[in-house]
C-alpha cells in the first residue's frame, strides 16, 4: 500500500499520505499507544516522501515545473507536514510515548519543511522562466509576468486545487524562517495574480498565452474566485499581524482589499453552484471563501471594511445565506436545479464538506451574537485541507 509512490502523488487529500497522516493524528484523539510497527511504517512513509523529493530534484530527466499542486503534489505534502507540526505544538507530542514524540518532532522539523518548499520554489522559478519564454517576454515586459509558475499535466492552472493560488496558500502557511528567502517571489507572483482579476471579479482558470477569454465562467474553489479569495485573505491578514508582518506595502494592501471585495460580491451572486454541496466545486467552497473575507474584514481595518460599509455587503451574512439555501438541497435536486455528485457524502464533493461549513457558520454566528472574538484560540477553523492551519510567526 505504501511501498511505491512518486513525488507528484504525495498529497493529503488524494493519496495514501493522507491516510498515514490521519493515522498519526489518531493517537491524539483516541489516546491509544501506537504499536512500534505501525508507528515505524507511518513515519517511514513520510521520510521517504522527503527523500524522493531530494532525489527527483537532482535528476536532470525530472527537471520540470510539474507536481507541485495541492490536490496531488508537493504543496499537498507541505500541508501534511504543517498539519502535523501544528498538532505537535498543540499537545500531540505530550500525549505520545517519549521516543515517538522525539521522532515526530524530528519529522516535522524546519529542515524537512525547507526541502519541500525549496523544491516547490525551484520548480516554480523554472516554470516562471518557461512562461516568459513562451510569452516572448522582453526585458520590458518581464516585470508584468510572475517569477513563479507551475503546471499540472502541461496546463498552467491558477486556482486552488491544481494551480498557483493553492501552492501560494501553502507557502504562506509556513513558518516565516522557511519562506523568508523567497518572499519577494511569492508576493510578486500574488500581485500578478491579482492583476488577472476580470471586470466581474473572477479569475481565469489557467494562463492564456495568446488571448484573454471573454468570460471566466468557473466560480468555485478549485478554479476561480473562491480559492483565490482565501489566499488573498490569508495574505492580507499576515500583512497586518503584530509580530513579523509580511512586507506588503499600502498600495498592494489596497489592491488586495479591492480584489477581495469584488470577488466576494461575485461569489455571493454565483456561488450557489449546481454541482453540489462539496468544498471543491460546490457550495461549501463558496461559503469558506466568504467566511475568509469576513474574517479579514473584521480583523483588519482597511479599505475592505470601507467598501463593505459603502456597498452594503455583509460577508458573514452572505455566507449564512448560502449555507441556509444549502440546507434545502433536496428540493433543488428534485427540481433538477442541482446535480448529485459522484461521491455525495465525501469531504470535497459532498455533504461532509458542507457539514464542516455549516459548523463554521454556526460558530461565527454564535461568536458574533456574543460579541466575542471570531476565532477562539483553543480551536482551529478554516477550510479542511486548505486554510485550517495555524501559521507560525
Image (cartoon, rainbow, N blue to C red):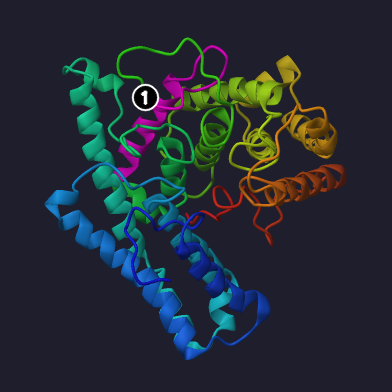
| Count of numbered marks | 1
Q: Secondary structure at mark 1?
A: loop
Q: In this rendering, is residue 33 above or below 163?
A: below
Question: Magenta span covers which residues?
Answer: 182-206
Q: In this rendering, is residue 87 above or below 291?
A: below
Q: Within the magenta stretch, is there residue 290?
A: no
Q: In this rendering, is residue 107 above or below 161?
A: below
Tell me what residue is drawn at x 55 percent, y 84 percent: 96
Left or right: where does residue 371 sit relative to residue 219? right
Of residues 141 and 70, the one nearer the viewer is: 70
The percent coordinates of residue 60 (x first, y second) are: 12, 51
Q: Within the magenta stretch, is there residue 185?
A: yes
Residue 106 visible? The answer is no
The percent coordinates of residue 49 (x first, y second) are: 34, 65
Tell me what residue is drawn at x 67 percent, y 79 percent: 30
Residue, disc 1: 207
The percent coordinates of residue 319 (x first, y second) are: 74, 34
Tell me what residue is drawn at x 54 percent, y 21 percent: 202
Residue 267 visible? The answer is yes
The percent coordinates of residue 367 (x first, y second) are: 81, 47
Left or right: where does residue 50 sit relative to residue 381? left
Residue 5: quadrant of the picture: bottom left
Instruction: Mark 1: give few (<14), some (14-19) or many (20+) Cα within 10 Å.
Output: some
Of all residues, the one furthest to the left in this rendering is 60
Of residues 65 and 88, the one nearer the viewer is: 65
Of residues 375 and 335, the one nearer the viewer is: 335
Of residues 293 and 309, the one nearer the viewer is: 293
Tell me what residue is drawn at x 75 percent, y 50 percent: 355
Quadrant position of the N terminus in the picture: bottom left
Amino acid at each position: 500500500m505504501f511501498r511505491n509512490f512518486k513525488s507528484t502523488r504525495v498529497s493529503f487529500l488524494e493519496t495514501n499520505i493522507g491516510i498515514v497522516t490521519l493515522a498519526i493524528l489518531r493517537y491524539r484523539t483516541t489516546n491509544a499507544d501506537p504499536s512500534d510497527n505501525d508507528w515505524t511504517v507511518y513515519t517511514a512513509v513520510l521520510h521517504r516522501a522527503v527523500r524522493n523529493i531530494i532525489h527527483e530534484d537532482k535528476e536532470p530527466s525530472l527537471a520540470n515545473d510539474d507536481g507541485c499542486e495541492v490536490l496531488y503534489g508537493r504543496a499537498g505534502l507541505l500541508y501534511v507536514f504543517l498539519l502535523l507540526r501544528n498538532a505537535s505544538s498543540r499537545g500531540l507530542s505530550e500525549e505520545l510515548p517519549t521516543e515517538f514524540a522525539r521522532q515526530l518532532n524530528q519529522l516535522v522539523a524546519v529542515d524537512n519543511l525547507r526541502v519541500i518548499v525549496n523544491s516547490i520554489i525551484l520548480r516554480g522559478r523554472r516554470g516562471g522562466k518557461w512562461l516568459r519564454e513562451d510569452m516572448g517576454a522582453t526585458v520590458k515586459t518581464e516585470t508584468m509576468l510572475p517569477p513563479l509558475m507551475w503546471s499540472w499535466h502541461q496546463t498552467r492552472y491558477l486556482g486552488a486545487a491544481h494551480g498557483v493560488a493553492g501552492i501560494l496558500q501553502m507557502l504562506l502557511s509556513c513558518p516565516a524562517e522557511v519562506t523568508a528567502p523567497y518572499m519577494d517571489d511569492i508576493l510578486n507572483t500574488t500581485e500578478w495574480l491579482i492583476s488577472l482579476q476580470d471586470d466581474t471579479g473572477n479569475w481565469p482558470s489557467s494562463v492564456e498565452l495568446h488571448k484573454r477569454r471573454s468570460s471566466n465562467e468557473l466560480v468555485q474553489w478549485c478554479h476561480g474566485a473562491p480559492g483565490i479569495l482565501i489566499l488573498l485573505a490569508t495574505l492580507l491578514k499576515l500583512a497586518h499581524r503584530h509580530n513579523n508582518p509580511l512586507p506588503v506595502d499600502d498600495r498592494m494592501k489596497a489592491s488586495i482589499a479591492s480584489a477581495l471585495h469584488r470577488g466576494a460580491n461575485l461569489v455571493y451572486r454565483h456561488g450557489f453552484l449546481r454541482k453540489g454541496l462539496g468544498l471543491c466545486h460546490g457550495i461549501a467552497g463558496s461559503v469558506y471563501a466568504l467566511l475568509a473575507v469576513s474574517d479579514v474584514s473584521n480583523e483588519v481595518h482597511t479599505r475592505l471594511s470601507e467598501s463593505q460599509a459603502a456597498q452594503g455587503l455583509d460577508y458573514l451574512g452572505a455566507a449564512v445565506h448560502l449555507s441556509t439555501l444549502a440546507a434545502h438541497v433536496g428540493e433543488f435536486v428534485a427540481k433538477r436545479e442541482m446535480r448529485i455528485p459522484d461521491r455525495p457524502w465525501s469531504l470535497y464533493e459532498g455533504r461532509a464538506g458542507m457539514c464542516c461549513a455549516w459548523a463554521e457558520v454556526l460558530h461565527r454566528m454564535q461568536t458574533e451574537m456574543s460579541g466575542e472574538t471570531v476565532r477562539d484560540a483553543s480551536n482551529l477553523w478554516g477550510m479542511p485541507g486548505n486554510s485550517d492551519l495555524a501559521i507560525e510567526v
